[in-house]
Image (tube, rainbow, N blue to C red):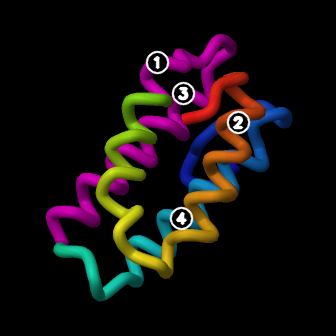
């Protein structure tokens, strides 16, 4: 999968949703450059876990909480947040 990431097929939908979220973050004029960089780092952290044979749900949850905390105040992210939450719930079995 793009950017030299290897993603297991069962995680592909989550990976793609994170890619879409990253695109939206990069194009946002509501976030500072520092916020964008931090958010992208957390997205990459989650994506890197998806390449592991046994991803660490704790790392995914922690990174996602930081992302959600920053972007949930902006309505333009609502659809992307909902989609990622749904897919992470499927992936981890937890509501986060």
Residue depicted at 70% across the width and 49% down the height: 1
- Dot 3 or dot 1, earlier in sequence: 3
Question: Mark 2 highlights which residue?
Answer: 7
- Dot 4 or dot 1, earlier in sequence: 4
In the rendering, which numbered label is found on residue 58? 1
Residue depicted at 63% across the width and 70% down the height: 79
**Label 4: element kind:** helix
Return the x and y of residue 32 as percentages of the image width and height: 18, 74
Q: Residue furthest right?
A: 9
Which-is-in-front pick, marks 3 and 1? 1
Which-is-in-front pick, marks 2 and 1? 1
Distance in Å between CA atoms under marks 4 and 1 = 20 Å
Judged by its main secondary structure, the magenta piece is: helix
Distance in Å between CA atoms under marks 4 and 3 = 17 Å
Return the x and y of residue 19 as percentages of the image width and height: 58, 60
Answer with left or right where residue 79 lies relative to residue 74.
right
Q: Quadrant of the C terminus?
A: top right
Distance in Å between CA atoms under marks 2 and 3 = 9 Å
């Amino acid at each position: 999968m793009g950017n030299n990431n290897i993603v297991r097929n069962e995680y592909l939908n989550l990976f793609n949703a994170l890619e879409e979220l990253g695109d939206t973050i990069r194009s946002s004029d509501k976030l500072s450059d520092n916020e964008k960089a931090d958010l992208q780092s957390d997205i990459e952290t989650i994506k890197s876990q998806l390449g592991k044979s046994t991803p660490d749900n704790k790392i995914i949850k922690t990174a996602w909480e930081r992302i959600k905390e920053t972007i949930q105040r902006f309505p333009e992210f609502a659809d992307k947040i909902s989609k990622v939450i749904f897919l992470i719930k499927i992936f981890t079995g937890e509501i986060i």
